[in-house]
Image (cartoon, rainbow, N blue to C red):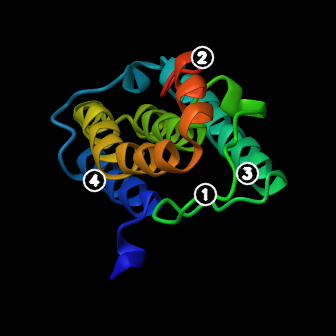
Amino acid sequence: MKWFDMPPVYLIAALALAWLQARIAPFGLSFGADRGWYWADLLGGLMIGGGVLLLALAVMEMRRKRTTIVPHRDADALVDTGVFSRSRNPIYLGDALILTGAILWMDAVLALVLVPVFVWIIERRFILPEENRLRRKFHTAFVKYTQNTRRWI
């Protein structure tokens, strides 16, 4: 059952809820696509692309440092280079960008509430435990990293 407790599962669930809201219960709300305003499609596409790029860069950096990308495992190295020099959690930031972009692209206005809920779940369920493990393993290096790099952006 541990495979279920992974960030991509939460992202897929949030995307499915957004899709359902857009298709089943739009309540006549729109970002303007019904009036020919396609800014949400463009912005949504850019956010999805940016999120995927951020994910790819983060995974490549973690592979380069030869550490795990699995949230519940202990890291073999403290990754503080590349995109990790700007955000301590670029993978989760990428997930949030993908979710927000998909909501805009799907025209799921009411599903925007899922973004802060998703961020809250990811922070409580994954980020805080990961940071505790990193703090225990890398001590001063991790504390210095947290002082120089924000959790999100």
Mark 3: amino acid? Met
Between the residue at mark 2 and the residue at mark 3, the CA separation in whole angstroms equals 19 Å
Residue drawn 48% across the image and 17% down it? 37
Disc with the residue nearer the chain's start (3 vs 1): 3
Label 3, residues with CA under 10 Å away: few <14, some 14-19, many ≥20: many
Quarter where residue 113 is shown:
top left
- Nearer to us of marks 1 and 4 is 1
Q: Secondary structure at mark 1?
A: loop
Measured Cα–Cα span from mark 2 to mark 4:
36 Å
- Front-most of residues 124 and 28: 124
Q: Position of residue 61 (x, y in %)?
A: 78, 46
Residue picked out by circle 3: 62
Mark 3 or mark 4, which has the lower sequence index?
4
Give the residue at x 62% y 59%.
Answer: 69
Instruction: Name which quarter of the figure residue 30 lies in.
Output: top left
Residue type, label 2: Asn
Residue 75's tag is 1
Q: Give SS at disc 3.
A: helix
Q: Residues within 10 Å of mark 1 (few under 14, many from 20)?
A: some
- For numbered disc 2, what is the local secondary structure? helix
Instruction: Report which residue position mark 2 lands on.
Output: 148
Q: What separation in Å lies between label 3 and label 4 (alpha carbons)? A: 30 Å
Q: Report the residue marked by disc 4.
A: 17
Q: Secondary structure at mark 4?
A: helix
Near mark 4 (Cα within 10 A), the count class, few <14, some 14-19 or many ≥20, is: some
- Dot 3 and dot 4 residues touching (CB under 8 Å): no
- The reply, left or right, for residue 50 in relation to residue 38 is right
Q: Amino acid at mark 1?
A: Ala
Gap in angstroms between the C-alphas marked 3 and 1? 10 Å
Return the disc, 2 or 3, that comes first in the chain's sequence: 3
